[in-house]
Image (cartoon, rainbow, N blue to C red):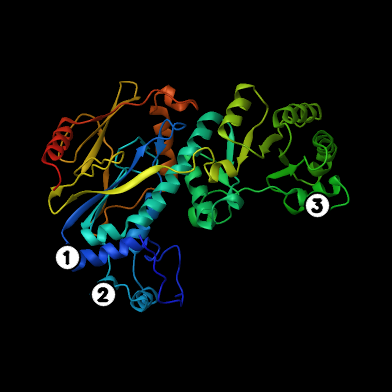
């Protein structure tokens, strides 16, 4: 594989997160080659995860709203077309076709916030082959990242249990601006209470939270002065950071300051601890606050938080009311990527199956049927041909037909409700942090027969 230098150096003015040029070069070269060969018949591609990471008992599908926005809004503007023409790689016919590009096909997907497992199609695109192929890179990019982060956040939500607050603090160490913003969305869908990432509120309506940094305290001559200045500037939902110098001494200062704040009509909501042995500090601070009559003041912890630490705090009864989670969330630091793919499953009316070693795919358009017991708990899934009708709830639903949205997408509030219902339906072993026995995902008889038939026939 060679990588020739681009013959054009002028960079067009692009909205980098929206341009359809945000793709791999081979998507465009295949588009060109399909047109040259006259291969424009209907094709279906499915997005799925090949295998679950060993530290994930399930995944939470996320990112469909951004996929729909991209698919329906994909346009090659003047800047993109000028660059494509100037670089000399593509035929005039291809550039003319791209100038008219509009998505004309269908999309089926599992709703956002649905629990999914390995090999299950999460999204399917059916459209003319060049059109469906061209969408691959950005679709994988959007679905992979938010599913990865939502699945990580789900572990934290389940570890924290009810009554505890989780906030996303991860923007500054996220792998880029879009990653930080979409991580706020994905974690909120999974059950976080909100985020410190400011654009999450105007973009998605996600509650944003913030306290203060150590620099604010350090900039003052003494800690009490810093607390007073901050309280008077931010009298609503006041939370003070108390570990800049001596955590327990600062907690005592908070107790001394509380009557003065109350006299000024400023209620103290909480204190935040960001360093040291969080559990030990929290116990001591809780004792100081309680003895000072501040039983209603909550303790919030941040700094190096992950689901394992949250679970340990809960198990040990540590008096922490909530956690701010940063790096471990937005980078999914224990497992930073999913083995996922967007693969052709049929073309021109014929099922297609990749048989590459270790990367074989299931052919044809498919549906997933999920069965529940009488208590509403999930018991097994079956991956079937789209044409089969099996017992259970079909997971993939129509989203786009003929390039038009079937119905408005659900609000984040509705998606969060779906997630909570999904948590309630999970078998108990899957809710834990330790690897559980694999959840049964079967292959239907019809799909099994098709796979056997294609394998016996050999290469198409």
Residue lying at 69% horizontally and 34% vertically, measured from the top left = 298
Q: Which residue is mark 3?
A: 229
As helix, strand or loop, the secondary structure at mark 1 comes to helix
Which numbered dot is residue 91?
Answer: 2
Query: Label 2 neighbourhood size at 10 Å, few (<14), some (14-19), many (20+)?
Result: some
Residue lying at 56% horizontally and 48% vertically, measured from the top left = 207
C-alpha span from label 3 to label 2: 65 Å
C-alpha span from label 2 to label 1: 13 Å
Contact (CB < 8 A) between labels 2 and 1? no
Which numbered dot is residue 37?
Answer: 1
As helix, strand or loop, the secondary structure at mark 2 comes to loop
- Can residue 161 be seen here? The reply is no
Q: Residue furthest right?
A: 221
Q: Nearer the viewer, mark 3 or mark 2?
A: 2
Q: How many marks?
A: 3
Q: Position of residue 283 (x, y in %)?
A: 73, 26
Q: Quadrant of residue 337?
A: top left
From the viewer's perspective, tell me whether residue 325 is left or right of residue 355.
right
- Can residue 327 be seen here? The reply is yes
Q: Position of residue 271 (x, y in %)?
A: 73, 39
Q: Position of residue 405 (x, y in %)?
A: 28, 56
Q: Position of residue 107 (x, y in %)?
A: 27, 52
Query: Label 3 neighbourhood size at 10 Å, few (<14), some (14-19), many (20+)?
Result: some
In the depicted view, which residue is nearer to us: 402 or 330?
330
C-alpha span from label 1 to label 3: 71 Å
């Amino acid at each position: 594989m060679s990588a020739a230098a681009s013959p054009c150096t002028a960079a067009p003015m692009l909205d980098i997160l929206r341009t359809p040029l945000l793709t791999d070069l081979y998507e465009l070269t295949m588009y060109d080659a399909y047109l040259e060969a006259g291969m424009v018949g209907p094709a279906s591609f499915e997005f799925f995860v090949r295998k679950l990471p060993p530290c994930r008992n399930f995944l939470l599908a996320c990112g469909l709203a951004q996929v729909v926005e991209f698919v329906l809004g994909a346009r090659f503007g003047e800047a993109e077309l000028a660059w494509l023409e100037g670089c000399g790689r593509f035929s005039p016919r291809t550039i003319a076709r791209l100038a008219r590009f509009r998505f004309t096909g269908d999309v089926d997907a599992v709703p956002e916030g649905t629990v999914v497992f390995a090999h299950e199609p999460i999204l399917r695109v059916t459209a003319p082959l060049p059109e469906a192929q061209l969408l691959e890179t950005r679709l994988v990019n959007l679905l992979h990242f938010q599913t990865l982060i939502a699945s990580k956040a789900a572990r934290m939500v389940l570890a924290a249990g009810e009554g505890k607050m989780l906030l996303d603090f991860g923007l500054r160490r996220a792998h880029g601006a879009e990653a930080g913003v979409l991580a706020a969305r994905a974690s909120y869908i999974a059950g976080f209470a909100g985020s410190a990432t400011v654009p999450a509120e105007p973009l998605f309506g996600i509650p944003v939270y913030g306290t203060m940094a150590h620099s604010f305290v350090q900039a003052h001559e003494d800690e009490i002065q810093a607390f007073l200045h901050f309280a008077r500037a931010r009298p609503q939902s006041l939370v003070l950071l108390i570990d800049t110098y001596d955590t327990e001494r600062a907690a005592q200062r908070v107790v001394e300051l509380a009557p003065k704040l109350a006299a000024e009509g400023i209620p103290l909501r909480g204190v935040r601890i960001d360093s040291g042995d969080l559990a030990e500090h929290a116990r001591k601070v809780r004792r100081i606050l309680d003895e000072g009559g501040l039983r209603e003041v909550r303790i919030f912890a941040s700094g190096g938080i992950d689901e394992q630490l949250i679970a340990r705090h809960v198990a040990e009864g540590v008096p922490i009311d909530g956690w701010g989670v940063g790096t471990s969330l937005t980078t999914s630091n224990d497992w930073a990527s999913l083995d996922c793919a967007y693969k052709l499953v049929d073309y021109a009316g014929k099922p297609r199956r990749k048989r590459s070693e270790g990367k074989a795919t299931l052919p044809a358009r498919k549906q997933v049927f999920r069965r529940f017991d009488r208590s509403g708990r999930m018991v097994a899934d079956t991956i079937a041909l789209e044409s089969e009708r099996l017992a259970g709830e079909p997971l993939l639903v129509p989203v786009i037909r003929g390039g038009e949205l079937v119905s408005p997408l659900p609000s984040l509030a509705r998606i969060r409700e779906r997630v909570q219902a999904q948590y309630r339906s999970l078998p108990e072993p899957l809710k834990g942090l330790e690897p559980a026995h694999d959840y049964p995902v079967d292959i239907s008889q019809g799909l099994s027969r098709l796979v056997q038939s294609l394998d016996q026939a050999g290469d198409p």
